[in-house]
Image (cartoon, rainbow, N blue to C red):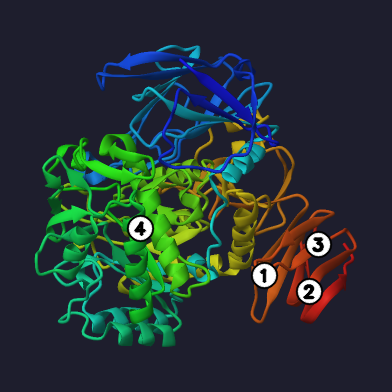
Amino acid sequence: MEIKALVNSKGTIRVLVNSPKSFVSYPFDGKEVDPQLLGEISITENTLEEFSLEGIQISIPLSLEDHVFGLGEKAFSLDRKRLKLQMWNVDVGAVSKYGWHTDPMYKSIPFFIIISANAVKGYFVNSPTKLIFDFGFEDYSKIKIYVPEKSVELFVFNGKSVEEIIENYTELTGKPFDLPIWALGYQISRYSYFPQKFVVEVVKKHIEKGFNVSSIYLDIHYMDDYKIFTWSKERFPDPKGLSNTLHDLGVRLVTILNPCVKVDQHHGDFKDAVKEEIIVDDKKGIFVGSMWAGECSWIDFFNEKAREWWKEKVKQWISDYGVDGIWLDMNEPTAFGTYMASLPFHSIHHTHEGEATHFQVRNAYPYYQALATFEGLKEAGIEKPFILTRSAYAGIQKYAAVWTGDNYATWDDLKLQTVLALGLSISGVPYVGCDIGAFMGRGKNTPPVDLDLIVKYYETALFFPFFRAHKATDGIDQEPYNLPSIYSEKIMELIRLREKFLPYLSSLVRESNITGHPILRPLVYKYFNDYDVYKIDDEYLVGDYLLYAPILSKDKERELYLPPGKWISFWSEDEYDGKKWISASGLPIFIAWNSLIPLKSRTGLDFVIYGQKGKITLYDGNTVEFDGNMLKTSQEVDIDKIIIKGKTEKAIEIGKRVNKVNISI
């Protein structure tokens, strides 16, 4: 076995075992070093019984004091220690039941972080095939990673903190794209809103009732016979007129796209795809399977020609119809009625490394689809593209936001959403969210609708970067204005509270785009030296300055942990010394000592100050800093008031455009 190691200026080590094919390539500039630098990592040949394939086993020591975080979307506790998990993109509902302990799920992010008493290290296995990660399950003292290939590329990240590891990981795989501000707003969706008149009516109803809507999504029923890049003439006779009407209302339009074309000799896209030879092959020709449009063939996004074709189709779609964003669904990729709802493992993709089987590259399929879609939006003139994808691979953060898939309207699934969002966040994917209200509705296998649960979904997702309500066809009409007033009023309060925090959330988007830092941060992200935080899955930091501990049950109170430091309630003047458990009710939001938080005000911004200093850079690049005596901004800004927290809260009214304010605490 040949092992080659290279190291770059950040201390990241690239390990090449034999001659791996980089089906997904990440730029790496490093010098060759002695593989002994890998220390106790062991790489051996092994035959994994599950696959009956010869492959490689990577073994890493695991001590009793170690804890493991990462691997993206996993329906288990955030600390992955003592778990055995898979990397294999699946449409969860097509192969099993969505919920706790379901594995695998839609996304494969083969990156994890080990936190030990003496060090923090990150590991990334760049292989889009089916991987098995055993974190001390079979052997308490070892992490075992099984790769069903004879070659593999491994990266080891060194750093002094979890934050530094994620910085280095996203330095390699790519910094998150610059999320447009409108994508932080309240988005609405349904499977499906149609016809065209009803789409406009739904938006107008929201606005008339006081619910600000940033965008509306169209699911598959807008299409002609479910064919991608088409419109149903009966349901949507004037799509350009629809987008114009929505834009006049201040609302964006996002349309869904699936990764396959209908097999129909009269369908232009199918004929073009066959002619250009950009369809996934089978042993006997092109692969044909079942999808919404009936018999379909799948675009081979590993093929550069296919990506170019798709990019041009997206570009034309945006330009012709005024569509603002793209929603990529079923892109695990899913084919109905097949084993694991997958394309056949032996089907062929044409990659830059030559031919590869679907089994070898499956997990990277959505990565290349998102890349081509992103380029199409860019070339259509959209400065800051927005893409939402259900499936993903490492590096997806460069191109798309994600959501947690087809959740159920149950209290258990509500609790799961926070764990999934935090798991993705600490794995380099910052723009995350869930279907608010839950996708699966009132079918025969689901409990009766609980309206309190719908409100709780809004509470839970209050700070999720992606904030969209979505429901299946069999669900209730859960648009807030359709609910009894006691529920609709609570939801309106929550949406308006989120809007108040948008300047802070948008500043975190800017930070994420530049540094790779997540927006939602498990407590272990910052307080990894505090043993008490390792098992906390239901509260988190929003940036550095806020802590949120939503009540994920019908209880009116909960116990929550305040990490080391000084904290104050967002709602009152109750101050706490950290490293202790407390009881809280309502919406438990706390501000950390030495924080500076921008909030949306009537005509500009309010700033909340707690402590002796604070600094933040707004979405537009304006840096605001408090030094204990003065608030300074790098550019003039409209400030309505400055709220000083601690002891006795006081507000200083400003109400003018300033870049310097004297403050007496």
- Chain-order first, disc 1 or disc 3: 1
Q: Amino acid at mark 3?
A: Glu
Q: Which residue is mark 2?
A: 635
Of the numbered discs 4 and 3, the one sitting upstream in the chain is 4
Circle number at residue 284: none
Q: Which mark is residue 620?
A: 1
Q: Mark 3 or 2, which is nearer the eye?
A: 2
Q: What is the C-alpha distance between the residues marked 1 and 3?
A: 15 Å
Mark 1 vs 3: CB contact within 8 A: no
In the image, what residue occupies the spot 30% across and 38% down? 356
Q: Which is closer to the viewer, label 1 or label 3? A: 1
**Residue at 75% of width from left, 74% of height from top?**
641
Q: Which mark is residue 307?
A: 4
Q: Nearer the viewer, mark 1 or mark 4?
A: 4
Between the residue at mark 2 and the residue at mark 1, the CA separation in whole angstroms equals 10 Å
Which marked residue is nearer to the observer: mark 4 or mark 3?
Answer: 4
Q: Which residue is mark 3?
A: 625
Residue type for callout 2: Gln
Dot 4 amino acid type: Arg
